[in-house]
Amino acid sequence: MTLTIALAGNPNCGKTTLFNALTGARHHVGNWPGVTVERRSGTFEHEGSTMEVVDLPGTYSLSARSEDERVASQFLASPEVDLVLNVLDASNLERNLYLSTQLLELGKPVAFVLNMVDDAENRGVRIDVPALELLLGGPVLPTVGNREQGITELKALLAAMARGESNRCRRITVDYGHDIEGELTKLQAEIGRDEVLKAAMPPRWLALQLLENNAEAKRLVAESHASEAIRQQLAKSFAFLEPHLGADGATLVAERRYGFAHGLVKEVATAADDKRTPTSRLDAVLTNRVVGIPIFLGILALMYSLSFILGKIPQDWIAAGFKALSGFAEARLPAGELTSLLVDGVIPGVSAVIVFLPVIMILMGCIAFLEDTGYMARAAFIMDRLMHVMGLHGKSFIPLIMGSGCNVPAIQAARTIESRQDRLITMLVTPLVSCSARLQVYIVIAGTFFTPFKAALAIIAMHFLGLALAVLMGRMLRSALFSGPSSPFVMELPPYRLPVLKATLIHMWEKGSVFLTRAGTTIFAGATLIWFLSRYPGIANREWTLEYQQKRQAVMVLNLPPAESEEHLRSLQLAHESRIVNTSLAARLGQKVEPLLRPILDPDHKRAEAWKDVIALTAGFVAKEIVVSTMAVIHQASEEPKAGERLSPLQVALRDGSGLTPLTALAFMVFTLIYTPCLGTIAMIRREAGSWGWAAFTVGYGLILGWGLAWLTVVSGRALGFA
Amino acid sequence: MTQNLPIPLSLLQPGDQGEVVEVQAQGEVRQRLLEMGFIRGARLRVEKLAPLGDPMELVIKGYHLSLRRDESSCILVSRVAG
């Protein structure tokens, strides 16, 4: 039988490192049912018994206000959990013990890990472990998680406890004092009237939460048939305690818990010496009034060069590999529907997904590194004022930065924001931050219509516009949708720590695989859908295929020199494909939708082929990088520049044949920036916000805002005399 | 050691020390502050202000925490000589 161990602890206590050390590679990342909090679970074996370890989200308490806390407290109360392993940061024992006082109320065996004992010792804190065991009523094991010290002993201990061989667990709870304990007993008696409620969680634990005025606990009670009696007793308890002890229930309970923790720490640990810690010496520089911000910007720049210079290398290999593959398939297979599906649909679809992997993994690695060192909290500290003005949270800065790499992981990163409101606003404005996929569109368009210098300016302007819009929308959403007070900015600045390479690598791999499974499948499905829309019905037209093959035969029997023959064949292929695309379902759709976009893309109504832009933009719903490849298909011109030429055949075709002017090209860029997040982002918003409604809202406001600003670009550009 | 009338924490300067008298915030903020150690009598020291002037960094219960002025003005402290 497998026993389940729940790993609980504060954020930054080294819980995840310990989890990795315990389970090694044998772990699985998923989601908690119904919510968007990540669920990590893994197994380990010790002398023949297998144990499952579930890593709970790091929380300071179990009061179930944030999603993280709700997940943790619900799971801990469930019968699934056999054993609780509470990870304590030895260098910050008192606050860590606050959570322990709650865990001890759950009525399950609790073992403790005293992590980072080395940090504590460096600060002059020595902890008397046997005394701590006695006072906590459970075994305590000192470890240094990031050096994997004490892991074998921990496994042996857990195995022994699971087999019931350890009798070191005694039931210990905080003594809340005569008055509060008296009221707790009365409340428990009322709760005990309802068997269902009694079974849901220990009555004493529920009574405590009621005294704390916990909304979740009150909701649970409201469903009970004993709710009226419980409510009356609670009102009586408040009426007695508050005047008597001079504070409300929540304060009283918190005070007693900290009283317990404080007394315990005094008993078992020596006081930290007053010498300056490495962390405060580092912070004297890193959050310094003068150099703090420049250093932060420098780190940001470094992170980006790493992602995009280093990431570009494998990206190029992947792109080249897929190109070779599709060339090979095309040469070997007969022309027709299946070959087209493979060469124009499946292979580019897979390529469009995988090509993003290196950049995402490197970026996520950098972010994990900064997070694990403790610097991310400083980044939020430094930037919070600015973010607050925007109606956001200091922690929103991180997703917004990541957004310029890719919106999909950025929206995931918004998970670090505790308040649902702040998280939601951050998720809704992140798509306005111009991502690297959109950059590909700007590069092609700006490179075609502007000189290199002006093109660079235009591209930079797009990024600033995106940020400015994120600010404005953040403020608007805050005042329009969430008029309540913004959530508290109560953020720990954890001590700086050297990250463990293994943890960073695991994190990179997890983020990469999440991208592949969550966003990858949608991008792939979308690419296939677009292939279908842009190839049918023409691709199934036998006469056209026959005609094409006959013409090829006719060229081949001419026995021309190879280069000339190749040239002929290529132009035949282009003609054949463009015949298919220009009569496709996508073309018909483009012609229908085009009038709507005329004011921004074709203000003079002179462009016969404006509907082609619509096809490309429609494809951009799937993923922005597909905009370029779709243009290449539609205009039947390669995206790759020939040797020695600045512009690619696609760019030449756009310049000479599309009818776009520099001004409408700029409007096209503005529209591309805003009009809709890609399908991967939409899917991620749906997952993270928990409803299709918010995803639809993001698309809707994007379309309106995008159209409006592109229109403004055209109108104001013309007023200033540009064309 | 309490010397003065309670003042909002936001009025303390970097280097100042204080003792929590009362958390006046309500609801979620209140609960969060209590859990993070802002209980009556808790000692704290203001470490610094962020480069842009807000939030503040302080040390309470032996760890570092940052608070916006919005929250720190809801916490009454009495100044304590360092």
Image (cartoon, coloured by chain):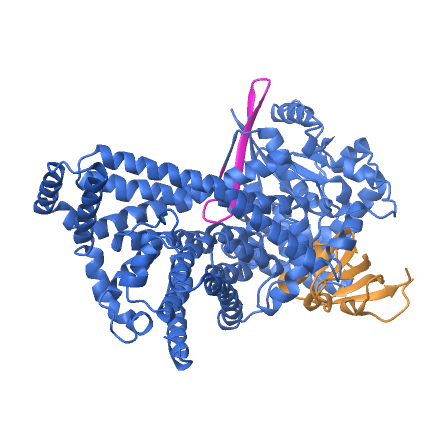
Q: Residue furthest bottom?
A: A719
Residue A410 image position (x, y, % from top left): 51, 53
In the rendered structure, the answer to whether residue A699 lies left or right of residue A364 reads left
In the rendered structure, the answer to whether residue A410 lies left or right of residue A279 reads left
In the image, residue A142 sits, relative to residue A393, either above or below, namely above
Q: Viewer-proximal residue, A529 or A434?
A: A434
Q: Residue furthest left?
A: A543
In the rendered structure, the answer to whether residue A582 lies left or right of residue A233 reads left
Q: Residue at x 47, y 59 (%)?
A: A434
Q: Viewer-proximal residue, A473 or A570?
A: A570
A47 magenta-colored = yes
Which residues are the magenta region?
A29-50
Q: Which chain appears blue?
A: A
Q: Residue furthest top?
A: A47
Q: Which chain appears orange?
A: B
> Which quarter of the picture shows residue B9?
bottom right
Instruction: Residue A179: tell me if it is visible.
Output: no
The prevailing secondary structure element of the residues shown in magenta is strand
Q: Viewer-proximal residue, A57 or A642?
A: A642
Residue A614 image position (x, y, % from top left): 28, 62
Residue B76 image position (x, y, % from top left): 78, 67
A336 magenta-colored = no
Image quadrant where one finds the C terminus of chain A:
bottom left
Residue A361 image position (x, y, % from top left): 51, 42
